[in-house]
C-alpha cells in the first residue's frame, strides 16, 4: 500500500523589505480579478444615479468603494510582509477570494439596498482566513507577536460589531456605519504601530499600480461602450467613433501615463517612514475612487453625444461631471506625490496649470463647443502635469538620498 503524504506547512517568516526582484505573485493577480467585478459594480451604480441627476449617489459610491478597497488593502499589506506561499496560505487566499466575491455581490445591490448580510458574511469569511494567517505570525515570527495579536483582536472585534450592526434599528444604522468606517481606518494603524515597516516598498508600489490599472479599466469600458453605441445606433458612426472615441482613449491613456510617471517604489524605498501606511495606503483611496468615478462619467459622455430627444444628460452636464472627476484625480494624485516625496517642487505649478485647462475646457463646452473637442482640450491638463513631474523627477533623483 502506497503511503499518502500531506505536504508540510512552511514556517511563516517576515519577508525581507529589501528583497531583490519582488514582483506580484500570480496568486495576487488572481485575487485582483475579483475586484475587477467589484469596481465595475460600484462604477455602474454611480452611473445610474448620475443619469437620474441624483447626486446623493456620490456618497453611496464612496461608501461602496471603501468597502471593496478596505478588503483589498488588508490582503495586500499582509502579503507584502509575510506571504509564505505554501498550501495553507493558498487555501486561505481561496477563502478570501470567496469572501471578496460575496462583497462584490453586495456592491451590485448597494445602491438600492445598502450593506446587507451577504457583504457582512463575505467580510467575516475574509477575516477568519486572515486571522488564521496572523495566528501563524503570532506563533512563529519572533518580534511580531504584538502586531499579530493586535491584528487578530482588531479584526475579530470589528467583524463582531459589523454583525451586530445588521440587527440595529434602521434609524441608527447610518450614523453607526460611519463610526464603524472610522474604526476600520484606525485599527490597522493601531495594529501596525508595533511593526510598521514590515512591507516591501517596490512590491507595495507595484500592487497599487496594478489596482490603478484595474480601476482605469472602467474608463476603457466606458470608451468601449461609447464605440459600441455609435456603431449600432448612429448613421455617422465612423466620424463619431474616430473623433470622440479617440479623445476618450487619449484621456484614459494620459491618466495612466501621469500616474506611472511618479516612481512610488523609489520614493517608498528612499524615504521610508512609519506613517507610509497612512499616506500611501490611505491616500490612494481617493486616487482610486476618482478614477472609478471617471469611468462612470465617460459613460455619460455617450448619453450626451447621442442624438436622442428629451434627454436629461446634456453635453455641459456630462462635461462638467467628467471634468470634476478629472480634477479630483489630479488634485489627489498631486497632494499624494507632494506628501510622499518631500524633495518635489513642481507639484503646485503643474496643478494650477491643469486647473486652468480643465476650467477652460468646461467653459467652452457650456458656450457651445462640442464635447468631443472639449475633451481633447482637457487632455492637456494631465499632459502638462506629466511633463512637469518628469522634470522634477530628474532633479530630485540626482540629489543625495535623505532617509527619514
Image: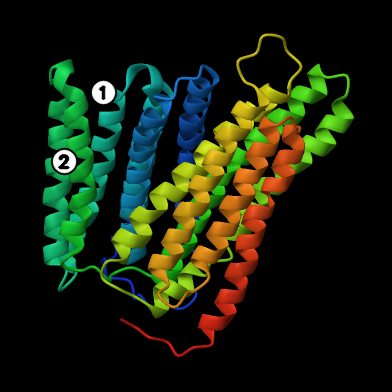
Question: In the drawing, does residue 146 fall left or right of residue 215?
Answer: left
Residue 122 falls in image quadrant: top left
Is 168 left or right of 206, judged from the image as shown?
Answer: left
* Visible residue check, residue 1: no
Q: Looking at this view, is 86 or 129 the one in front? A: 129
Q: Could you tell me which residue is drawn at 14 percent across and 43 percent down? A: 156
The structure residue drawn at horizontal position 76% and vertical position 16%, both measured from the top left corner, is 307
At a point 54% along the width and 58% down the height, the residue shown is 352
Task: Determine the secondary structure under disc 1.
Answer: helix
Q: Residue furthest bottom?
A: 400
Mark 2 lies on a secondary structure that is helix
Which is more N-terminal, label 1 or label 2? 1
Q: Nearer the viewer, residue 243 or 209?
A: 243
Measured Cα–Cα span from mark 2 to mark 1:
15 Å
Tag 1 residue: 117
Mark identifier at residue 365: none
List x then y, in percent, for residue 311: 65, 13
Q: Is residue 329 above or below residue 345?
A: above
Residue on which disc 2 sits: 158
Q: Please report contact status of discs 2 and 1: CB closer than 8 Å, yes or no.
A: no
Classify 10 Å Cα crowding around label 2: few (below 14), some (14-19), many (20 and above).
Answer: some
Amino acid at each position: 500500500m502506497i503511503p499518502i503524504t500531506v505536504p508540510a506547512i512552511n514556517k511563516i517568516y517576515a519577508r525581507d523589505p529589501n528583497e531583490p526582484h519582488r514582483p506580484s505573485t500570480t496568486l495576487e493577480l488572481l485575487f485582483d480579478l475579483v475586484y475587477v467585478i467589484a469596481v465595475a459594480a460600484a462604477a455602474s451604480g454611480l452611473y445610474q444615479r448620475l443619469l437620474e441627476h441624483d447626486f446623493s449617489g456620490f456618497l453611496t459610491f464612496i461608501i461602496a468603494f471603501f468597502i471593496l478597497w478596505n478588503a483589498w488593502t488588508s490582503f495586500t499589506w499582509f502579503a507584502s510582509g509575510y506571504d509564505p506561499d505554501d498550501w495553507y496560505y493558498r487555501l486561505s487566499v481561496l477563502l478570501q477570494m470567496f469572501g471578496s466575491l460575496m462583497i462584490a455581490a453586495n456592491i451590485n445591490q448597494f445602491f438600492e439596498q445598502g450593506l446587507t448580510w451577504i457583504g457582512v458574511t463575505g467580510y467575516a469569511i475574509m477575516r477568519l482566513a486572515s486571522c488564521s494567517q496572523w495566528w501563524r505570525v503570532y506563533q512563529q515570527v519572533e518580534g511580531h507577536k504584538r502586531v499579530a495579536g493586535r491584528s487578530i483582536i482588531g479584526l475579530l472585534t470589528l467583524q463582531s460589531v459589523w454583525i451586530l450592526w445588521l440587527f440595529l434599528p434602521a434609524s441608527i444604522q447610518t450614523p453607526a456605519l460611519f463610526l464603524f468606517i472610522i474604526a476600520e481606518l484606525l485599527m490597522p494603524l493601531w495594529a501596525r504601530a508595533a511593526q510598521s515597516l514590515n512591507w516591501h516598498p517596490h512590491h507595495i508600489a507595484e500592487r497599487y499600480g496594478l489596482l490603478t490599472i484595474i480601476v482605469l479599466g472602467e474608463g476603457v469600458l466606458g470608451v468601449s461602450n461609447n464605440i459600441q453605441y455609435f456603431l449600432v445606433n448612429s448613421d455617422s458612426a465612423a466620424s463619431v467613433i474616430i473623433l470622440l472615441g479617440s479623445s476618450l482613449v487619449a484621456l484614459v491613456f494620459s491618466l495612466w501615463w501621469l500616474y506611472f510617471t511618479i516612481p512610488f517604489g523609489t520614493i517608498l524605498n528612499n524615504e521610508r517612514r512609519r506613517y507610509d501606511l497612512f499616506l500611501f495606503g490611505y491616500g490612494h483611496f481617493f486616487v482610486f475612487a476618482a478614477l472609478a468615478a471617471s469611468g462612470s462619467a465617460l459613460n455619460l459622455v455617450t448619453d450626451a453625444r447621442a442624438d436622442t430627444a428629451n434627454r436629461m444628460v446634456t453635453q455641459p452636464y456630462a462635461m462638467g461631471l467628467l471634468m470634476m472627476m478629472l480634477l479630483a484625480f489630479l488634485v489627489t494624485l498631486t497632494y499624494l506625490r507632494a506628501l510622499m516625496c518631500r524633495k518635489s517642487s513642481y507639484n503646485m505649478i503643474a496643478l494650477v496649470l491643469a486647473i486652468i485647462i480643465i476650467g477652460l475646457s468646461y467653459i467652452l463646452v457650456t458656450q457651445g463647443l462640442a464635447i468631443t473637442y472639449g475633451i481633447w482640450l482637457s487632455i492637456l491638463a494631465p499632459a502638462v502635469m506629466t511633463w512637469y513631474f518628469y522634470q522634477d523627477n530628474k532633479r530630485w533623483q540626482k540629489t543625495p538620498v535623505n532617509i527619514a
